[in-house]
Every structure is written in C-alpha cells, then in structure tokens.
Image (spheres, rainbow, N blue to C red):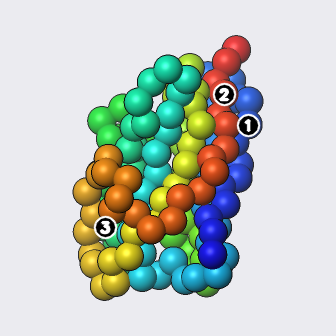
Amino acid sequence: SQLVESGGDLVQPGGSLRLSCVASGFSLKNYIVGWFRQDSGKEREPISCVSSSGPGADYGRSVKGRFTVYRDNDANTIYLQMNDLKPEDTAVYSCAAGWAPNVSFCALQRRKELYNYWGQGTQVTVSP
C-alpha cells in the first residue's frame, strides 16, 4: 500500500499546476488526506486537507484562495489545483492519508502520527 504524488514541475510566477496523489493497495474514500510542503531548511508545512466524506476542506493562510483540493474516489486520487503560483510556493509537496471514515470536515494537522500513509513527494519550482 502506498501513495504516489505527481504533477510537480518548473513553472513561472502566476502559472498553475495540478498535483495528484494516487493511492494503491487501499481505498482513499475512508481517509482524510492532507497536503504538505517542505522547502530546504524549512519545517514541513501543512497546506490543505480534504475530508473523507462530503465537501470538507481546509487551507493554510499562505495558499487560501489560490489552491483547491478535491477528491475523485473512482480514480482513488486526491488533487491539489494550484493557481497564481509564487516563488515562495517552491517546495517538495507531499500527501498523507489518515484513517477517518465518514468524517465531513478536516483541519490542518502537523502531527505526522495522525497519518497512516505518506507519499515521497513531488518537486514544485516557481521561477521566472
């Protein structure tokens, strides 16, 4: 069982990317999924999460209004749509899944032990 992120790339400021977090070996529909990012020399930052049930989502202040998280349970995938990217968004982006069936809300959590699965990350670089 694993999570695999993809979609990271080099993009100019103001550009957009869509990251994917695909689960294999288990179904994401019973999991809250969080997105995190970490740039070299900085702490890992939780930036978004999506609930296991319903439209619940949460965003960090630095990305609110620019990023959107959503799930496709048929594809067993969570997406992070990132618009109006800025140089300070440069980081390795990772997703993590925590067991929480039928939960319609989520809140950003830093604690790694709350999540059962972590992906390896995908690099996003925002530069002219």
Q: Are marks 1 and 2 in contact (CB under 8 Å)?
A: yes
Which label's residue is closer to the chain start, 1 or 2?
1
Locate residue 25 relative to residue 34 in the image: left or right: right
Q: Residue at x 28, y 78 (%)?
A: 103
Q: Amino acid at mark 1?
A: Asp
Give the crowd class for mark 2: few <14, some 14-19, many >=20 residues within 10 Å.
many
Q: Amino acid at mark 3?
A: Gly
Locate residue 117 relative to residue 105 in the image: left or right: right
Q: Residue at x 32, y 47 (%)?
A: 110
Residue 53 horizontal/vertical position (percent): 35, 80
The N terminus sits in image quarter: bottom right
Q: Residue at x 28, y 63 (%)?
A: 106
Residue 52 horizontal/vertical position (percent): 38, 76
Residue 56 has which mark? Answer: 3
CA gap, disc 2 and disc 3: 28 Å
The C terminus sits in image quarter: top right
Residue 56 horizontal/vertical position (percent): 31, 67
Give the crowd class for mark 1: few <14, some 14-19, many >=20 residues within 10 Å.
some
Task: Count up the numbered dots.
Answer: 3
Q: Secondary structure at mark 3?
A: loop
Q: Is residue 67 above or below residue 38?
A: below
Give whichever of 67, 93 is nearer the camera. 93
- Residue located beneath label 2 in the image: 125
Q: Amino acid at mark 2?
A: Thr
Give whichever of 55, 7 is nearer the camera. 7
Q: Secondary structure at mark 1?
A: loop
- Residue located beneath label 1 in the image: 9
